[in-house]
């Protein structure tokens, strides 16, 4: 399903943004509600794109055919079954149907050669889509025990960016970022690492064979980090 955020110039690049289905009290108790923080579509619009919310259940190929680029947004934990692992007790709030739908979106977008940006959960899912694996709970995984806040809280730290990577062309060789996660990428699969935190955690990935397939563990939309989103929009033109 596609939901237009607001009327706008259809000549702008159409940027599809994934959303999450959650149980919330909305007009009545415990309804399934499509949710996405407003700063996602807001920063896309500020960077010259036309934001379109993609909701789980829509035909992945039809959704991809309707957009010029794709953002896989942050959200809940990924079901470890998607990468062949058994969940640890701290892994929670998984929704396998969302995982499968978003993985299908990524596959369809890759087939069409669309620009893709993964953010937080989206960064982790990008790794999974390329054959990678995740750390399920950083607070119990050395040396990342003090990596950052999670559970709705934020922390800040610096990342080092790999020289001559696509991400370095956008951000330079370092960036101050935010952190709000308890899982992380342990194996990037066939993607290349383009950024790491001070404790060595993989903070960014990219596919160097494609025009723009980049993922970051942090939240550029919450930081107001327009450079990454602007680069995505430019790649969609």
Image: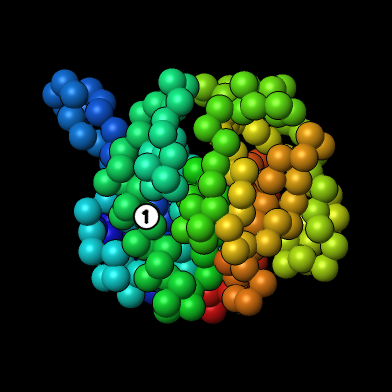
Which quadrant of the view contains residue 32? top left
Q: How is the image coloured?
A: rainbow
Q: In front here: 58 or 201?
A: 201
What residue is rendered at 29% in x and 70% in y?
A: 61
Residue 16 point in image, percent of width and height? 41, 61
In the rendered view of the protein, which quadrant contains the N terminus? bottom left
Is 23 on the left-hand or right-hand side of 125?
left
Percent coordinates x, y for residue 104 in the rendering: 34, 62
Residue at figure coordinates x 30%, y 42% from the top left? 96
Nearest the viewer among 234 and 59 is 59
Q: Which residue is mark 1?
A: 102
Residue 15 left/right relative to 234 = left
Mark yes or no: residue 62 visible: yes
- Furthest residue to the left? 28
**Neighbour class for label 1 at 10 Å: few (<14), some, many (≥20)?**
many
Q: Quadrant of the C terminus?
A: bottom right
Residue 15 visible in the shown view: no
Q: Residue 79: x, y in percent? A: 38, 39
Q: Say which quarter of the image contains residue 232.
A: bottom right
For the point 64% across and 27% down, the residue is 141
Place of residue 137 in the rendered image (x, y in percent of width and height, measured from the top left): 56, 27
Tally of numbered tags: 1
Q: Secondary structure at mark 1?
A: helix
Q: Residue at x 42, y 77 (%)?
A: 111
Q: Which of the two residues, 88 or 67, is positioned nearer the viewer here?
A: 88
The foreground one among 180 and 50 is 180
């Amino acid at each position: 399903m596609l939901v237009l955020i607001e009327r706008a110039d259809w000549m702008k690049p159409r940027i599809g943004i994934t959303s999450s289905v959650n149980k919330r009290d909305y007009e009545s108790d415990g309804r399934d509600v499509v949710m996405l923080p407003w700063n996602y579509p807001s920063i896309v619009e500020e960077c010259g794109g036309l934001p379109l919310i993609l909701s789980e259940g829509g035909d992945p190929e039809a959704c991809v055919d309707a957009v010029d680029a794709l953002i896989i947004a942050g959200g809940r934990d990924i079901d470890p079954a998607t990468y062949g692992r058994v969940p640890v007790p701290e892994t929670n709030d998984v929704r396998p149907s969302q995982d499968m739908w978003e993985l299908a979106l990524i596959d369809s977008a890759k087939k069409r050669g669309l620009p893709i940006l993964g953010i937080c959960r989206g960064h982790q899912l990008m790794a999974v889509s390329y054959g990678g694996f995740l750390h399920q709970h950083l607070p119990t995984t050395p040396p990342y025990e003090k990596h950052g806040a999670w559970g709705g809280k934020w922390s800040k730290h610096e990342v080092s960016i790999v020289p001559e990577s696509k991400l370095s062309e956008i951000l330079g060789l370092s960036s101050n970022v935010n952190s709000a996660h308890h899982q992380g990428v342990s194996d990037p699969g066939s993607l290349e690492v383009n950024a790491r935190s001070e404790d060595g955690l993989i903070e960014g990935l990219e596919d160097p064979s494609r025009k723009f397939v980049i993922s970051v563990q942090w939240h550029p939309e919450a930081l107001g980090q327009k450079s990454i989103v602007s680069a995505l929009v430019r790649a969609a033109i």
